[in-house]
């Protein structure tokens, strides 16, 4: 038997639909749609269609209708208007019907409901069947697989160009991306959705079962981590993870945000493994968001220079950089060893020198008047400008790599312009996890 999560959510929030009396199913579904969107038109569907959605779950058609008018803050307010007694009842119902492992804290109920609804819409958009989940869970082994959705990634970014730094003697690439639809001021709607859909996988250890409660905990963990003063910009760290997984198939071992939950830290922002048939690379993540591209590159170079392996007077092997005690604390010794052995059958397959995965966000700047041209002309100028930025970054970072004698390492670099990198990135994460 399967659990229909949309039906459970509708049932849980039924008491908020009307003040008294029995609530018809179409009315309850309509209340969800009206409060999850800016201006849902109730005549979009008839009563029979609302009933069908209740019993069958959301579908790609309704997900498309909802997509452009979603208002998550409005939905949070809808749930938060419940009395304490109603919140207890709703949280208890969700806990029981969804077979959650932990109870939902009342102060996180609205966040939980928004996350659940957003997941259901995303799943319906992609046409998968996760809205109904099996009640019996299989004892699967930890999956060391890619977690970033290719379809969602390509809906957010357009790759303008990719280049290489000739000074680097190992594999390397620098990618220049721009947010679709490549018009200023940039739209962050799809970027927010991409970030939200990856927060849990970024912040929670691999192998930990991802539930709606886990998503709530990820948000709480990241709020504490952001306030700790350790990260300079949380969105940059998250995007490093997203780009490395998508572009390089470099899979997360652990992130600095993730291990903050066990009061541990590392000098890089995350550890990743990139594997092909012949060899494996350990990649150390780092990011920088700055309104000036030149300063952003300088700052990320300074970060790398302070990494433990770059401060050492002797060669530090990649195998010495991975902290097995962290993996053991996160997953247990047997499971952490299994993960490593999945990727590294023997140490001879691992490159001795650590590599780097870098995300650089900066402010888009052009002297041309983008307002006084056609849509296609504006896009062309945008792409040309970003390509020029790529050439500048290749030259600047290449010189720094030579100066620091890092030519034996691989570098995987991702550039992304923002309307205002520092301000916009902080606002995006504040919208997602709160202040």
Image (cartoon, rainbow, N blue to C red):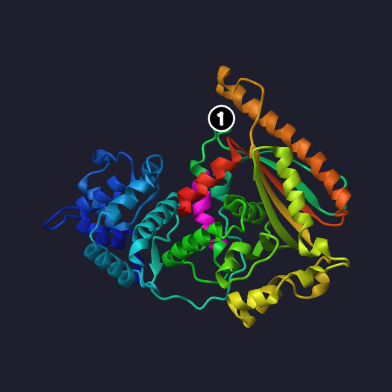
Q: Is residue 314 left or right of residue 425?
A: right
Question: Residue 201 at x, y = what percent?
Answer: 55, 62
Question: Residue 191 at x, y = what percent?
Answer: 53, 45
Residue 308, compared with residue 385, is above or below; it is below
Q: Residue lying furthest left in this view?
A: 21
Residue 435, compared with residue 335, is above or below; it is above
Describe the element under mark 1 as helix, strand or loop: loop
Residue beneath disc 1: 184
The magenta segment: 191-202
Q: Quadrant of the N terminus?
A: bottom left
Question: Residue 428 at x, y = what percent?
Answer: 51, 46
Q: Rate crowding at label 1 as few (under 14), some (14 to 19) or many (20 or more) other CA atoms within 10 Å.
A: some
Residue 168 visible from this viewpoint: no
Residue 137, compared with residue 405, is above or below; it is below
Task: Write the residue at 69% across / 57% down.
Answer: 285
Dividing the picture into quadrants, the one containing residue 295 is top right
């Amino acid at each position: 038997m399967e659990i229909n999560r949309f039906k459970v959510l509708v049932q849980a929030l039924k008491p908020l639909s009307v003040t008294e009396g029995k609530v018809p199913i179409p009315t309850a579904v309509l209340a969800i749609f009206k409060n999850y969107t800016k201006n849902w038109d109730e005549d979009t569907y008839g009563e029979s269609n609302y009933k069908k959605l209740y019993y069958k779950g959301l579908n790609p058609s309704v997900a498309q209708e909802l997509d452009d008018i979603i208002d998550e803050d409005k939905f949070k307010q809808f749930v938060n208007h419940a009395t304490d007694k109603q919140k207890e009842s709703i949280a208890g119902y969700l806990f029981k019907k969804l077979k959650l492992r932990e109870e939902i804290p009342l102060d996180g109920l609205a966040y939980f409901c928004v996350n659940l609804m957003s997941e259901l819409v995303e799943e319906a958009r992609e046409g998968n069947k996760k809205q109904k989940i099996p009640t019996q869970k299989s004892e699967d082994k930890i999956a060391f697989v890619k977690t970033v959705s290719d379809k969602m990634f390509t809906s957010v970014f357009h790759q303008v160009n990719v280049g290489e730094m000739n000074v680097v003697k190992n594999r390397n690439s620098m990618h220049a991306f721009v947010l679709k639809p490549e018009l200023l001021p940039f739209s962050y709607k799809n970027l927010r959705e991409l970030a939200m859909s990856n927060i849990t996988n970024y912040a929670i250890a691999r192998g930990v079962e991802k539930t709606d409660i886990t998503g709530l905990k990820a948000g709480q963990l990241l709020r504490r981590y952001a306030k700790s003063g350790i990260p300079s910009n949380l969105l940059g760290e998250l995007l490093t993870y997203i780009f490395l997984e998508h572009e390089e198939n470099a899979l997360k071992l652990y992130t600095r945000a993730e291990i903050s939950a066990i009061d541990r830290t590392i000098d890089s922002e995350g550890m990743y493994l990139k594997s092909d048939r012949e060899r494996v690379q350990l990649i150390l993540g780092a990011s920088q968001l700055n309104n000036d591209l030149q300063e952003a590159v300088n700052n990320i170079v300074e970060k790398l220079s302070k990494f433990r392996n770059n401060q050492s007077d002797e060669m530090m092997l990649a195998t010495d950089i991975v902290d097995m005690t962290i993996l053991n604390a996160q997953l247990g010794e047997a499971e952490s060893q299994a993960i490593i052995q999945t990727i590294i059958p023997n140490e001879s397959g691992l490159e001795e020198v650590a590599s780097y995965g870098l995300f650089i966000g900066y402010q888009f700047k052009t002297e041309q008047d983008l307002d006084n041209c056609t849509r296609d002309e504006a896009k062309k100028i945008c792409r040309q400008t970003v390509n020029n930025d790529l050439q500048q970054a290749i030259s600047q970072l290449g010189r720094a790599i030579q100066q620091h004698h890092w030519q034996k390492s691989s570098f995987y670099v991702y550039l992304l312009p923002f309307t205002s990198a520092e301000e916009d990135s902080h606002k995006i994460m504040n919208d997602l996890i709160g202040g």
